[in-house]
Image (tube, coloured by chain):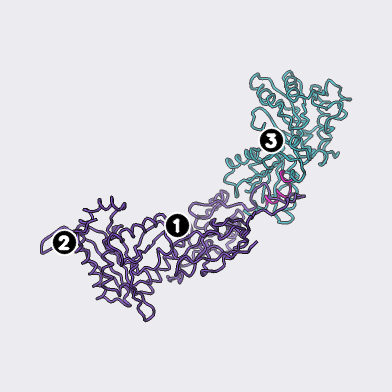
Amino acid sequence: MPTLSYIEAISRAMWEEMERDPSVFLLGEDIGAYGGAFKATKGFLDHFGEQRVIDTTLSEAGILGAAIGAAVVGMRPIAEMQFADFVTCGFNQLVSNAAKIHYRWNLPVPMVVRLPAGGYIHGGPYHSENPEAWFFHVPGLKIVAPSTPYDAKGLLKAAVRDPNPVLFLEYKYLYRRIKGGVPADDYVVPIGRGDVKRDGDDLAIITYGSTVHFSLEAAAILAKEDGIETRVVDLRSLKPLDVDLILDSVKATGKVLIVHEDHLTGGIGGEIAALIAERAFQYLDAPVRRLGSLDTPVPFAPPLENHVLPDTQKILEALRALNRF
Amino acid sequence: MAKVEVIMPQMGESITEGTIVKWHKKAGEAVAKDEVLLEISTDKVDSEIPSPVSGVLTQIVVEEQATVPVRTVIAYIDGSPDVRSVPSGPPAVPETSGVAAPAGPSVLPVPDKPQGGRFYSPLVLNIAREEAIAMQELERIPGTGEGGRVTKKDLLAYVQARKSGGTPVPGEAPPPPAMTIPASVGKPVDVPELRAKYPSPAHEIIQMSNVMQKMAQHMVHSQHTSPHVNAVHEVDLTPVVNHRAANSEAFGRKEGFKLTFTPYVAHAVVKALKKYPLVNSSLEGDKIIRKNFINLGIAVASEHGLLVPVVKHAEEKSFLGIARAINDLAVRTRAKKLAPDDIQGGTFTISNYGVFGTMIGTPIISQPQVAILGTGAIEKRVAVINDAIAIRSMAYFTLAFDHRIIDGALGGMFLEEIVKSLEEFDTSIKF
């Protein structure tokens, strides 16, 4: 099985889908001639041509509007926001049009929006955002957030094939840092299904994205030093959530920590905590805890960024406090 | 930077010790001159103590709830003209994030239960129900979680042990201890061991306030010191009742406060004490200390608890003077502005439990006094006067006295003197 980096897996998925289905095409800033800001689409223009690899103007609203238009007439666009932070310029297209057109006109909008998201890369406040909370709230949009190369390829393929608008969150921090086995064949990771990355029945962490890896580190330390076994649940899909897996993890352990890189207040951790309180109350041996980044724009200075964002040490301390309860 | 000692102050001439109730500042905190630094409790009154200087409270030497003699050093302040609680110089920027986790406190607080019982998580209650463990049994299971909480693991371990039949049921309620009067009532007890003995919801564990503890100690001390004898006398208060009714409006307008029965009784007591000064004394070994002044204590039920403010030198005061002094004390008691001297140095006490409807009481002497007058409720009753039936306002007065120095004869005569004063009250007195 080939070993690919996280960003290589994403490239692979796009390449294979464009080969498989001629209606799939790419549009975004600097994706063609430049090969993409992160080189995710390097070589695509030469191979697939400028009809299917479109360098757009600097206009997120334009990119998303064009993608929606293409999708409603039967194409399957993969639109790229160069940094997830910039999606706000096309917010209306997504929430008013992409999310509602099927409801209003009975026309599917089978588009994918790729969003390089997250911090830990010294990008400062305009290049480090996590946008999922803004769209989690909107009926009509799906959101996926893989943390491994295997999940990235499988979920991007699933997203392309889904008749709904799907926001695909990809984590800049993981692009070249995480490598893993990615089967060469045409496999799909179903949307709406989470994955237990590490099992244990003392504590449970519910998380996604870059913090999956910090959580695994913390769980390993906790097992080694304290003899506590922590289940690490990688949600992979944010909308829809794998509610059964979440509730099952509560039943298995009784003590849950929700971790996400996004800001704590109003992050989707709150929704998950409410779901647990509503539907698994009698299985709780401790209050549901959440860990997110501080409620401040992500700083540029590295010591400040480290202070604001979650990391292995913070997760470890939270786990220990939860265990002591 | 001068190192200043903070000492336990002497709030009154005869006060020898004080208890620290609450420190208002923590070690390391800045405090300004005259800012409240701590609260102390002496005998019965709590006082706020201001800081003697501005500076930083560097060290707390005596902790809360500790009792120390006056003038003991209880803390040190680094006095400085312009003190800041942050160190000078630019703060060092940490290389790595060794700072507090955004997850919140490293200790998760266990939720409070209103009745003071233990907190049981939904899961623990669920398992208990499934395993048919009643609440009483659950109460006795030891907990290893935060604050002694029974965790899922604790409960499962208990269930396991119970099933294997090996370990006996933990914490069978021990037989109640033999009744003893503890030497010092109100000693603080560790709550977890109490909870095992007195589980909720049948029991509630309440911490006695300092005022309550002092009262408890005093009452036990008094009973152990003075052999109490109670003499009860009926008193016909009709002339007093009539006089008061006739004069209260004018009195209220002129003095600005209500005319109650208390000044009548106090006035009569002062007269009787002047005639029988042995009742206005105290005992030191084999010596009787007779006082040539009368400091009359009037027991008051305040929201703090039982307080006995004292009218000093009542022997110098007229009826009006006594009335004004009593009212002044009442006002200051309600406003919580009593000084420790206000509740010290009494030579005789009056306790009016009649306001609660009690007909006859047996009050406890306030040491080191040797007698106390309890006044019962005034009620209209049928009485025989000159062989005729009359309706009179009557009450029962009880004199509790210390039979070490007051015998029945003296006690009876003293009480009768009070009764006579009241029954022969000069109703022509006007205000």
Q: Which chain's colour is cyan?
A: A
Image mark for residue A258: none
What amino acid type should be assigned to the residue bearing mark 1? Ala
* Occupied quadrant, residue B237: bottom left
Q: Residue at x 81, y 29 (%)?
A: A14
What amino acid type should be assigned to the residue bearing mark 2? Ala
Q: How many marks?
A: 3
**Which residue is labeled 3 in the image?**
A238
Q: Which quadrant would the C terminus of chain B be assigned to in this image?
A: bottom left
Residue A308 magenta-drawn? yes
Look at the numbered disc 2 and give the secondary structure of its residue.
strand
**Which residue is labeled 1 in the image?**
B202
Judged left or right of residue A215, residue A176 is right
How far apart marks 1 and 3 lie (CA) works out to 48 Å
Magenta region: A306-319
How far apart marks 2 and 1 lie (CA) works out to 49 Å
**Which residue is labeled 2 in the image?**
B383
